[in-house]
Image (cartoon, helix red, strand yellow):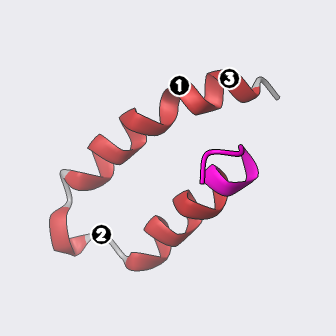
Amino acid sequence: MDVEEWKAEIPQVVAWFETFGEKLPGVLWAELDALKARLGMA
């Protein structure tokens, strides 16, 4: 797994999630936060 590649994609994922507004389940934000923590971004 290329950690730097994943780190570079996080802002794109955030932007995509934001397009869903309140309709996006909170669990997906939690998963993204967990991924960021595993990548050392939290």
Q: Are marks 2 and 3 in contact (CB under 8 Å)?
A: no
Foreground residue among 23 and 40: 40
Q: Quadrant of the C terminus?
A: bottom right
Give the CA separation, mark 2 to mark 1: 22 Å
Q: Position of residue 7 (x, y in %)?
A: 59, 32
- Residue at which label 2 appears: 24
* Amino acid at pointer 2: Leu
Q: CA distance from mark 2 to mark 3?
A: 26 Å
Residue located beneath label 3 in the image: 4
Judged left or right of residue 13, residue 8 is right
Tell me what residue is drawn at x 77 percent, y 23 percent.
2
User: Are discs 3 and 1 less than 8 Å apart at CB?
Assistant: yes
Does 33 sit left or right of 5 as displayed?
Answer: left
Is 41 situated left or right of 21 in this image?
A: right
Q: Residues within 10 Å of mark 3 (few under 14, many from 20)?
A: few
In x, y percent, where is residue 26? 39, 77
Judge from the rendering whether residue 41 lies leftward or rightward of residue 13; answer left or right.
right
What residue type is disc 1 on?
Ala
Residue 38 rendering spot, x and y as whole percentages: 75, 52
Q: Which mark is residue 8?
A: 1
In the image, the segment drawn in magenta is 36-42
Return the residue nearer the eye: 41 or 28: 41
Rendered residue at 47%/67% (across/down): 28
Q: Residues within 10 Å of mark 1 (few under 14, many from 20)?
A: few
Which numbered mark, 2 or 3, is in the foreground of this view?
A: 3
